Image (cartoon, rainbow, N blue to C red):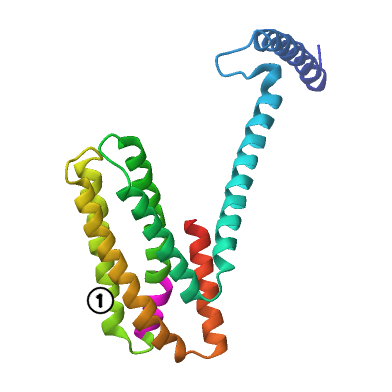
Amino acid sequence: MATRTQSRTSNRSANNRSSSNRGSSGESSSNKGSAFSWGDNAAPIIAAAIGGAAIGFAANYGRKFLMQGMEAAAGDWDEILAAEHDMALAIFDKMLATDETHTFKRKMLLMKLTHALDKHAHQEEMVVYPALRNANETTDADQLEGEHGYIKTYIYDLDEMGPDSSNWLEKVREFRALVSRHAHMEEEEVFPRFKAELDEEQNARITSLVNRDGFWMA
């Protein structure tokens, strides 16, 4: 009669042979492939996807560095924002030079203007206007930020009416006049008075923050 140890040894040997046979069968089945198997080409495909994403990521950051670097070269925070005013007004002028046959061009210019004003508003609302309020310039900060709401309304109206609308140019002229008045108040009244109260370190700090927020919105 076999001992318990011999029985366990015999059973393990039988189980191992059975597992070996199932493994061989499983490998044979897996070699046939399945609906969720990438096969031998998985590594090159994944590598290409990762490489493409990395290139796109790097290109986007490169574009941001280039754009914001060009603005940073303008100087202090108030000079950067003034340059952005000029850029927006130049887009307005291109829009006003179109007619009803230039629907695609109008759409593209409106998209460009929207992005430029969104970026500009973000820099002012997140950095400059809070700094104005902390310097007891709350009335001017509230007025200027309130005008940003009307700027967004003009963008909404132009988008809704469509580029082939008969009064599209009239709406653009009204919009440009608002932005021009807004820019004049900032450049000629509010910003110079506020900047005169800043020391060198405070001025550099606001410039740095404007550049930082401009980079992320570029």
Q: The residue tagged with tag 1: helix, strand or loop?
A: helix
Q: Amino acid at mark 1?
A: Gln
- Residue 3 in percent (x, y) is at 81, 18
| Total marks placed | 1
Magenta residues (range): 126-133
Position of residue 211 measured from the top left corner of the image (x, y, whole percent): 53, 68
Q: Is residue 152 left or right of residue 75?
A: left
Front residue of 138/104: it is: 104
Q: Is residue 127 magenta?
A: yes
The residue under the point 49% across, 65% down is 213
Q: Position of residue 84 (x, y in %)?
A: 44, 64
Q: Which residue is mark 1?
A: 143
Q: Is residue 183 above or below residue 21?
A: below
Residue found at x 34% / y 36%:
104
Q: Is residue 6 above or below residue 106?
A: above
Residue 173 visible to the viewer: yes
Rendered view: 214 above or below 209:
above
Locate the N terminus and report the quarter of the image it occupies. Answer: top right
The residue located at (21%, 46%) in the rendering is 168
Say whether residue 114 is visible: no
Q: Quadrant of residue 193?
A: bottom left
Residue that lies at the very extreme toward the left in this rendered image: 166
Tell me if 112 is positioned left or right of 50 in this view: left
Q: Position of residue 187 (x, y in %)?
A: 39, 77
Instruction: Quadrant for residue 65, please give it.
Output: bottom right
Query: How dense is the environment of label 1, judged by Cα within 10 Å: few (below 14), some, or many (20 and up)?
Result: few
- Magenta segment: does it hold 99? no
Q: Quadrant of residue 105?
A: top left
Question: Which SS does the magenta portion mostly show?
Answer: helix
